[in-house]
Amino acid sequence: MDILVCIKKVPDTADAEVILRSDGKGIEEEDLAFGINEWDNYAVEEAIRLKEKEGGKVAVVTIGTGDDEDILRRCLAMGADDAYRIDSSPFYMDDPYSVAKGLSAFAKKHSFDLIMTGVMAGDMSYAMTGPLTAGMLGIPHTTLVTSIDVKDGNISVTRELEGGLEESVRLELPALLTIQTGINEPRYVSIMGIRKVRSKEIPVLRAEELGLSAEEIGEQGAVLELESLERPPEGKEAEMISGSPDEIAEKILEIVKGVV
Amino acid sequence: MEQPYREVFWNISYSWLFYILAAVASLVFFYGIYKRAAFWMSGWSERRNGGVDLKRLTKKVLFTSGIFSDDIMGGTTHFLIMWGFIVLFLGTVLSTIDHWIFHFLEGKVYIVYSVSLDIAGAALITGIILAYVRRYIVKRKNMVTIVKDHVVLLLLLFIAITGFFMEGLRLHANPVPWSESRVAYRVVDAIFHGSRAHLLFEHRLWWWIHSISSLFLVAYLPFSKFIHIFAAPTNLTLDSMNYTSFLTLDEREKVTTDFSKHQLVMFDACTRCNRCQVVCPSSNAREPLSPRMMIEEVGNYARGASGIPFVSSKRDADQHDKATASLGDTIWYCTTCNNCYEVCPVGINTSDIIREVRAARIESGGEVPVNVQEMLESVYKFKNPWQGSKGKRMDWAEGLDVPVFSKGADSKRCLFVGCTPAYDTRLQSVARNVVSLLEGADYDFAVLGKEEACCSEFVREVGEDGLFTELAYQNIDLFERYGITEIVAVCPHGFHTLRNEYGLMEDSAKRLDVVHITEVLERLIADGRIKPTREVPLVATYHDPCFLGRRNGIYDAPRNILRAIPGVKLVEMPRSREKSFCCGGGGGRMWVESNADEKIAEIRVAEAVETGAEVVVTACPFCFSNLDDAVKTGGYEDKIKVMDVSELLAESVLEPGSS
Ligand code: SF4
Ligand code: SF4
């Protein structure tokens, strides 16, 4: 079974102080650490596990700059067989339609039985790229996948629903799945492992090679346009408690006592 | 009067048979030694950091100081057996020289020779008896005895006793006018009776029995516990040369074997004396790690494919997948405290072996605890183990005026803050105190600020040398860029790594002068630049961090700081200095949970409480958090609290609330 995993490099903003860029259309990147999007990492691990079980090959692809190749190499070290980079310069990356056009054009040039990607990317959280790509390819898809089982040309997957419910779905291959975190425990990739694949070539594809024109994928062809990023207004209920840990604990206790 | 001497093959016919047997035994012996040596040589080469330390070697090898420490009886036992054995062996060699090369064993020389051998024989027998007393009468705790140990001991005993029989019978059957081997003579008197012809027969019989068992011992030696006769001195020699098992990434890519030469020698040097396990903090907390078993199991794996007869077994090699699988979780419990190494009489560095096994586990994609994995990923991504963003690395310095290299600070001296004092909100005060104390003393320094990368000590200890190297180079590049020649490290882990390990990969790092903050504070106090004047009336005990103490021999600097503070009364725990009991946080253990009932740190806190101290002082952020947690989880909150040396000093020096 040949699998394609679409991945993306994103900043880790969990603990970081996010500073908006002055044009309001992005964030200051200087102090941020970048890495593979968490959901995508689970997808890559799942693809490699499927390959280890079912045979076939795993390819990974990203639309990005040369700086993004480290996440591709990391996937190669994890066990992916091939990695491709689609040069992102003509793409309007804030529009998932534009990204999906690139990915689907790439997928069409190869034949994959299964395409996977993370449920969403940690930066913009659209959760659209996967479904849009499937739509453009005209293949079935499902989202929020938490387990995959392959049976004679079909796959059965479970999906995570609200309220702890799970849904089982069967899809015919080829199909596209968006993978939820927690589906597996991604393996650790050592620096030595990454070094071992350092000489492996990563082909770089340009949009025209995929039959895409700058108008289609650039800002003018965008379906969705990013107007501005803003901080949510501070909620009235939110109160920042300051002081030493002991003082903070005491104040919280008082508040809780007041409510109960 | 006839000159005292002994005819070598007196009363013995078929001496050629003896030579044939001796030749066979020697062949077997040399084959065995060759196989062992080939096994040792099959490892990769390590870096040597020094020449042979003869003084240390003499102490450890000839006087077996490691066996005596804390165990006089064990030391005596081994000393008697060892020297008895050596002298008797030399005796045989001398007699061979005397017989074949040139004759010198006669007259007074012969008497001295003969008496020495008698004494050696008696020593050997006494030693073996003591060995059994230790095992079965005194019942020294924690000793492990396996069948093979009896083979070795009884064989030696048998050879020694039959040697006396033989000598006594010779003297009975052929009385000599000089006095010789009185003890043997008497012993034989009591056991053997009969005509001269009978005694001559008995002599021949025991001569052959003695000779054959001795030759058997020679042949058996390389395939038994006796190999430590060669492996232990070899290991101690390598150890005294301060080898470090470190491979650059290029080298690591090329090596095809799992262990270094030195590490392979370690496996053969172990005598299963169990001293390591007695002191191991993990074993003490009843976790499943036993350093002795670790050496044995990993050694079995390593020897598995070496083809040493009776020693290696293919099965052992197959059972372990790259020395990792069957060891399961146990490899993650080691705190790399090096207490085992400190007490090992033959200089086995178990944590070094464990790190190698962990590396094999990581590189082969085996089970790595999730927390360890997250820590590594955090170091890779954020350059610190605490998932702290780069932007927050200088949060600790808020409100302080700290010179930063990237902002043009002009200094050759770098205060290496370390990730834990920088990010851990409980420990940021350590960094703040240190800075205030240094600035108060007009001590020139600057920090790397947001550019500082994790020292990666625990990254190396959990076996991720690749990541360790990458981070180390980031720091080394910074040191070069800012022309830094001197480092003051706040955390002992950074101190150890920058001081001892960065130089392994880059020459410029070798020239760095790396000191720990306690050394600097001690000096500044001595020079009168820091004046602890405010009374701090406290009974304090000092907990030696492993990476400051055992790893780097710094025991006095922190104690001297405490002594300089008026009002502080310093009391010692039973296990202090070289014998310090680890807090349980080294070598990546901060990220490995255990299910043991009592945590390592709780054992330590209990020990501190026993001394009657009101505060346990340490000089390491990891020790601090571990002990501090243990004070809470162990329910000692009303008895003791944890402080950093700098914190206590700051109380005596700084205006309250100034940092
Ligand atoms: S490693 Fe050293 S201390 Fe431990 S059992 Fe072996 S010889 Fe004894
Ligand atoms: S280094 Fe410490 S924790 Fe590790 S095996 Fe030795 S004594 Fe035990």
Image (spheres, coloured by chain):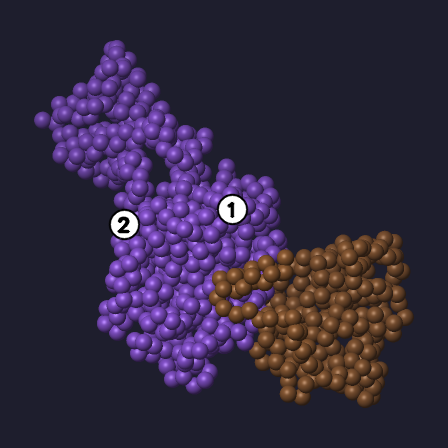
Q: Is mark 2 within 8 Å of ligand 1?
A: no
Residue situated furthest top in the rendering: B194
Horizontal and vertical percent for residue A161?
80, 59
Horizontal and vertical percent for residue B423?
50, 68
Q: Which chain is purple?
A: B
**Circle 1 — which element?**
helix
Between B392 and A193, the residue placed more toward the observer is B392
Dot 2 and dot 1 residues touching (CB under 8 Å): no
Q: Which chain is brown?
A: A
Viewport quadrant of the C terminus of chain B: bottom left
Please state which amino acid type lies under the numbered disc 2: Thr
Which residue is label 2 attached to? B58
Q: In this view, does B144 lie above or below B635?
A: above
Subunit bearing disc 1: B
Q: Tell me what residue is drawn at x 47 percent, y 52 percent.
A: B632
> Which marked residue is nearer to the observer: mark 2 or mark 1?
1
Which residue is label 1 attached to? B298
- Report how far apart the C-alphas of labels 2 and 1 lie in the structure: 29 Å
Q: In this view, does A9 lie to the left or right of B127?
A: right
